Each structure stands twice: as C-alpha cells, then as structure tokens.
Image (cartoon, rainbow, N blue to C red):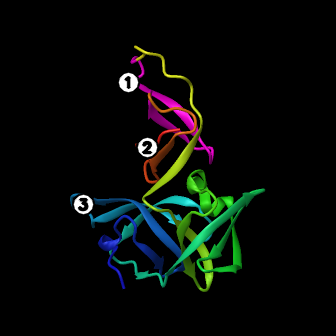
Amino acid sequence: MLDYNELKIGTIFTKNDDPDPYVVLEYAFIRMQQRKPVTQLKIKNLLSGKVQDYAAHQNESFYEAEIEKQPVTFIYHRSDEYWFHEVGKPGNRFKLPDSIVGDAGEYLKSGTEVKAFRFDDKVINIELPVKVDLRVAEAPPGVKGDTATGGTKVAVTETGAKVNVPLFINEGDIIKVSTATGQYVERVEKA
C-alpha cells in the first residue's frame, strides 16, 4: 500500500475505488493552514490515455500496480495503429492505438527497441529509450550570419518529429534526440 505523499513522478498505482492503473506525471505537496495536507497530482490513466488533475488525500488508499516490463521491437505504423513484436519472437505481434502511444510515436522508427508495460496480461503503454538516433529528412539551409533565432533552425526527422537543431545540421545527417524533451543532443553522423 502507498501513502498519498509517496505518489511521486513516474509512480504507477491503482486507487481503492478504481482498478485502472495510473502513472503520476506531475506532483506537488500542498500544506494549507488549519486544513489537512493534500498531494496535487496530474495523472494519466494507462488504459484509456486520459490525463487529469487529481487531489490525493491522506484518508485514501493507493496500491502499487502490478506492472510487468518487457522489451519489444517497433515494426511499423499504419492507420492509427502501431505494431510491435516481442524481442526474439517476431511471430508474437501486437498493436497499440495512437491514443496509447501518443507523442512517443514521433520517435519510433522500424527496429527501435522499447519497453512494453503489461497489466493483467495486456500491453497498456510503452517506454522509449532516453535518446534515439534519427536521420534528418528536411532541413532549411543555414544562412551564414543568421543568428537572430539563436543559431538554430527547425529540422524534420525521418519519423516526422520537428526538432530545433544548430545551423550546421543538414538534410541526411543523423542526430541524437532526447525523447523526454524532444531536444537535439548531438550530431551522430554527417551526411
């Protein structure tokens, strides 16, 4: 069992009145005068993908969700569905809808290994690697002396993600991108 003040960012839990698993996205502990303390949370339902604000009180019961993590490989994306297979078992395929994958889809390319979260023997979410290498599909030319935008330009990767990159990045370069922030990290290979 978890106390209301143990619901930190990244904690996956279930509530006493709701069997669905939730993950904590934002956390703030609030103590008001002459009132009981409250934990103000932003949580995401891992089955529906719905994000909501939630105030957790000390008289509520929370439990750690029984989540199994398993490595899987991304295969392809077609018509609002993302297809994966278990690592080493290409025949064991499954699909997830856009609503579950969400913004993570911008960093998935064929062959990317991710972690799948299983709850009650059903895949409910994925976790990306911290950084991914992506090829730049489109990049406007960098004009010498153009530093009005801080020396950056917007490039589009092979997966469709838009990333602010330095002016020296060109089409065809391979760059490393942080999946948590969507920011450029470094150039891995020059075209």
Q: Nearer the viewer, residue 135 or 104?
A: 135
Q: Is residue 185 above or below residue 87?
A: above
Mark 1 packing: few (<14 Cα in 10 Å), some, or many (20+)? Answer: few
Can see residue 45? no
Q: Is disc 2 placed on a helix, strand or loop?
A: loop
Q: Residue 31 — which label?
A: 3
Q: Is residue 40 above or below residue 122?
A: above
| Residue at the (48%, 78%) spot, across then down | 14
Q: Is residue 94 above or below residue 101?
A: below
Please tell me whether mark 2 or mark 3 is closer to you in this view.
2
Q: Amino acid at mark 3?
A: Arg
Q: Residue 135 — which label?
A: none
Residue 149 among those drawn in magenta: yes
Q: CA distance from mark 2 to mark 3?
A: 35 Å
User: Residue 67: percent from the left, percent from the top?
Assistant: 49, 81
User: Residue 187: percent from the left, percent from the top?
Assistant: 43, 42
Q: Is disc 3 placed on a helix, strand or loop?
A: loop
Report which residue position mark 2 lands on: 183
**Residue range highlighted in magenta:** 147-167
